Image (tube, rainbow, N blue to C red):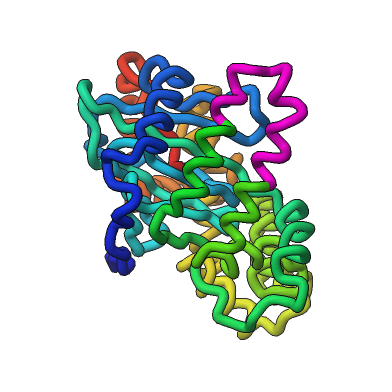
């Protein structure tokens, strides 16, 4: 496991920040108990957890901006570990299967987080205004990046959440505040990474297109050469860039998607392990059981039984 470099906390956003305190209050109002809640604002989700997680929770995370008002969290992408709290913001730039764990939370000071989905088309439109002369050339990096939390960004997020309780104003003003958040992100140290989400000619966008194909066809055999042709790259270049962005090979990515989908099917539709494995593309029940155990840490039947028991007492926080 490798740990990503974490910048020093931003002094202006210490725990006493008025904007962070206001954000925490809004999140408590919108998340009255533990769990993840989708607000009336499109693409905005809030989370609360009153205890730290013993285990990682698995999910496929789409491009999004994630902020924490209180508490702390860690996310694993492949074997890489990313940590963030009220002084740091995390951005996902591509759909990726991740494992997430709340590491700091209590009844008196619950973990409080917000996730705002990022629209590539809207980012592309605003990038043209923020970078009228074009984007500077630079490496594209991983699908996850962490940096210091910018004061104007948190202020805009506070104003966005305030609109969630005023639906008559939200319809008119929320799109404007969302644009402000994106513009401030584009002008921040994370700006170039965010801008690439909307750039069709970027390697990141090509990997994102390949990821979308794998997610839509995860139960089919994976032909890497054909997938490389689909995104107009040579097989060697495609493999290199896919791993550079997602921290895993195309086959490892497909395996993670398959196993997470099998787990979902067993939990929600009560399929047995053999049927769920076949449904997601495994021909060998023993291979499915073996790979499931490696990925989730337990055999399918025991893992699902544990999750059902936990679901009776808590609503797990998602990966934002």
- Residue 34 in the image, given as x and y percentages of width and height: 36, 21
Dividing the picture into quarters, in which one does residue 39 lie?
Answer: top right
Q: Relative to 288, say whether 205 is above or below.
A: below
Dividing the picture into quarters, in which one does residue 311 lie?
Answer: top left
Q: Is residue 81 visible?
A: yes
Residue 95 or residue 12, whichever sits in front = 12
Residue 83 or residue 137, whichever sits in front = 137
Is 167 placed left or right of 275 in the picture?
right
- Residue 262 in the image, given as x and y percentages of width and height: 51, 39
The quarter of the image holding the N terminus is bottom left
Dividing the picture into quarters, in which one does residue 302 lie?
Answer: top left
Residue at 59% x, 63% y is 187
Residue 312 or residue 50, whichever sits in front = 50
User: Bounds of the magenta span?
Assistant: 161-179
- Residue 169 in the image, given as x and y percentages of width and height: 71, 22
Residue at 75% x, 52% y is 122
- Residue 158 in the image, given as x and y percentages of width and height: 51, 34
Q: Is residue 258 visible?
A: no
Is 67 placed left or right of 230 in the picture?
left
The quarter of the image holding the C terminus is top left
Q: Is residue 256 magenta?
A: no
Majority SS type along the magenta span: helix
Q: Relative to 306, say whether 124 is above or below.
A: below
Residue at 71% x, 56% y is 123
Residue 305 or residue 237, whichever sits in front = 237
Residue at 55% x, 80% y is 139
Q: Is residue 166 magenta?
A: yes
> Total label count?
0
Is 282 placed left or right of 101 in the picture?
right
């Amino acid at each position: 496991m490798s740990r990503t470099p974490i910048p020093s906390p931003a002094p202006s956003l210490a725990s006493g920040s008025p904007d962070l305190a206001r954000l925490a209050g809004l999140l408590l109002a919108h998340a009255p108990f533990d769990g993840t809640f989708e607000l009336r604002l499109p693409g905005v989700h809030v989370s609360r957890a009153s205890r730290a997680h013993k285990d990682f929770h698995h999910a496929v995370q789409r491009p999004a901006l994630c902020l924490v008002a209180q508490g702390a969290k860690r996310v694993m992408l492949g074997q890489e570990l990313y940590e963030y709290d009220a002084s740091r913001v995390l951005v996902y730039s591509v759909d990726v299967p991740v494992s997430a764990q709340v590491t700091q939370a209590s009844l008196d000071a619950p973990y409080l987080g917000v996730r705002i989905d990022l629209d590539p088309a809207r980012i592309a439109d605003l990038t043209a205004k923020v970078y009228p002369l074009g984007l500077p050339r630079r490496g594209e990096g991983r699908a996850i990046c962490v940096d210091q939390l910018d004061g104007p960004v948190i202020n805009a997020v506070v104003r966005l959440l305030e609109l969630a309780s005023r639906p008559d104003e939200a319809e008119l003003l929320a799109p404007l505040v969302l644009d402000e958040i994106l513009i401030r992100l584009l002008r921040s140290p994370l700006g170039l990474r965010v801008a690439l989400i909307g750039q069709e000619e970027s390697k990141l966008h090509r990997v994102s297109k390949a990821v979308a194909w794998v997610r839509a066809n995860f139960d089919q055999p994976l032909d890497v050469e054909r997938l490389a042709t689909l995104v107009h790259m040579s097989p060697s270049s495609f493999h290199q860039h896919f791993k550079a962005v997602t921290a895993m090979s195309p086959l490892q990515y497909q395996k993670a998607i398959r196993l997470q989908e099998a787990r979902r099917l067993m939990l929600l539709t009560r399929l047995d392990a053999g049927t769920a494995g076949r449904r997601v593309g495994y021909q060998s029940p023993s291979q499915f059981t073996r790979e499931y155990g490696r990925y989730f840490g337990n055999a399918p039947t025991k893992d699902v039984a544990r999750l059902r028991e936990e679901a009776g007492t808590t609503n797990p926080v998602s990966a934002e």
